[in-house]
Image: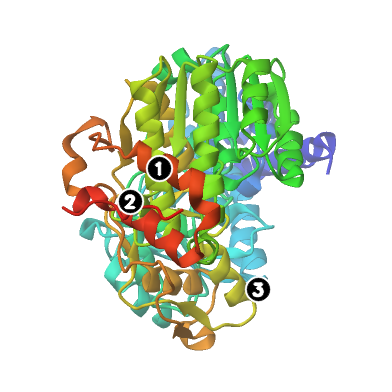
Amino acid sequence: MTYRQRLSIFIFIDLCIVLASLMIIKVLVSSLFYNTAAALILSFAVIFISHIYFSFQLNLYRKVWEYASVSELIIIGKTVTYSVAATAVVQLIVFQTLYVRMLVLTWMLHILLIGGSRFLWRVYRDSVMLVQQNKKRTLIVGAGSAGTMVTRQLQKRNDSELTPVAFIDDDENKHQLDILGVPVVGSVNDIAQKVKELEITHIVIAIPSLSKRELNVIFQECAKTEVKTQILPMLEDLVTGKVSVKQFRDVQVEDLLGREPVVLDTESISDYIEEKVVLITGAGGSIGSEITRQAAKFHPKKMVLLGHGENSIYTIEMEMLSNPQTENMELITEIADVQDAEKMMQVMGEHQPDVVYHAAAHKHVPLMERNPEEAVKNNIIGTWNVAKAASWHKVSTFVMVSTDKAVNPTSVMGASKRLAEMIVQNMNQNSSTKFVAVRFGNVLGSRGSVIPLFRKQIEKGGPVTVTHPEMVRYFMTIPEASRLVIQAGALTEGGEVFVLDMGDPVKIVDLAKNLIKLSGNSIEEIGLEYSGIRPGEKLFEELLKADEVYKDQVYPKIYIGKTVKLYIEEIERIMEDYTSLSRDDLRARIINLANYSNTKEKPLPIIS
């Protein structure tokens, strides 16, 4: 319906209402005022013309009445009041008196009839049209301002498939009360019971300010049911208008880590990245590509994306070229292997980077157990080549990505990364470049992470395989890991090992169970099986050894490890002689050397 059509209909309705009001008042009020036709005609004309005038002035005819609320009611009140006041002025001028009873009744009838005519459509829409639709009965967790906004949005949208049935809130003062006609039925502990009682088919968590630990508690209660659970977008996304309050998202495993993410010190980062040349090795990998995205936000002059796999480098290049943040930035790709020392020298010499993020590495524990020579070539020799080239060409800052598996390593992968840390720390003692290593735990969603494996197993209908019921790991997200790497470059004075405070470790079996529930399945449907600990794996990981620990944080949630004794000569001998050793012997030598600082024995000799 066009605006002109709507306007004609509403003016006609108001004409009828004014006329009907005067007729009703004539019956109800006995007065000489109504004995003449002139008095009736004058009153009708003044009230109607005033009503039309003030309706236009206050935009009463521009309101969408299917969404009418208190503000529309206030405008109706103002319009009627001004119209009656104008009629009173005319009565004083023409008749030198006020007909108070007539004016009061006119005001009351107009409020009732005009307001009723406008709100009738909304009442019909809310109580008849929307109820007739087959919508999902929804439980809103959180009866605060966000929950109220969600409920209002769901109630007034025809295209929404959800209808709010009840609120859940831990504030006992709200219990047994109604908000927008929706009752507050209990606390978080009552979720499972209320879902059953009210035949709920959908849950929306509408508390954007929740900490991850609090969200985890609520989700565990929701997980006791079999209904789909979604969450309101992040508060900053709502405030900036990036997403709407009605755009719910599924709860992710990342939401349930139980701690708050690291916040970057953007000022210090800008100082060492902005208008500088940044080189990233392993730029096509899950960590390297995210470092690329995060670093681009700080407007470097040039970014060099170096990687061995052409497909992954092409993918991140295409993504960055379509990113508005890279419009004024030079983007270079280099297909190169960090094992090629000459190529590393050539790349560093050509681009003269100010900052190097070294993310290239082999990270898969069982594969490195079976191929220890590849761990030596990529993780140890590769790090040596990149670090030496960076030092030679006087790179300002070099940040190496390490792992918590480098602490008291039992695996070839962890041991090779510990030896790579020693190389970087030793290089710092003999170079103008500031070298630093950054350790973190398992990265959710990265290549080789357990999460993609679990998801594939769930998609196939199960079972989900977990190595051991007591196995625990520290977890972080890919963006969080990348932020830590970038922040380390701003904090380093050279030679440190930075570690993120990753909160409490998470049981792998609990992670698997949460992922099954988040997928909308039950544990009984998918199933859980224990496959046994694989070669090189530990039941738990550590972030710092006892002799490395500094108790004080150098930045919120970031710790620094001490430099321990470095066995560079022994590492050089391994790099020289690894091809002549059997895999078993090489594995033993690497792990023994990486753990030597914890023992009183000398490292095992290398047998040529």
Give the percent coordinates (x, y) of residue 291.
Answer: 54, 35
For the residue pair 569 and 30, the one nearer the viewer reads as 569
For the residue pair 496 and 85, the one nearer the viewer reads as 496
Give the residue number, with chain letter if any, for mark 2: 593
State whether residue 151 is above or below residue 83. Answer: below
Give the percent coordinates (x, y) of residue 568.
Answer: 36, 37
Nearest-to-viewer mark from 3 and 1: 1
Q: CA distance from mark 3 to mark 2?
A: 67 Å
Label 3 Cα neighbours within 10 Å, binned few <14 / some 14-19 / many ≥20: few
**Which residue type carries mark 2?**
Leu
Q: Residue at image x 39%, y 54%? A: 590
Asked if marks 2 and 1 touch (Cβ < 8 Å), the reply is yes
Give the percent coordinates (x, y) of residue 131.
Answer: 61, 69
Q: Residue at image x 37%, y 71%? A: 510
Q: Could you tell me which secondary element the residue under label 2 belongs to?
A: helix
Task: Answer yes or no: is residue 169 visible.
Answer: yes
**Which residue type carries mark 1?**
Ile
**The N terminus: image quadrant:** top right
State whether residue 188 is above or below residue 157. Answer: below
| Mark sitting on residue 134 | 3
Q: Is residue 554 left or right of residue 371?
A: left
State whether residue 212 is above or below residue 203. Answer: above
Give the percent coordinates (x, y) of residue 245.
Answer: 54, 46
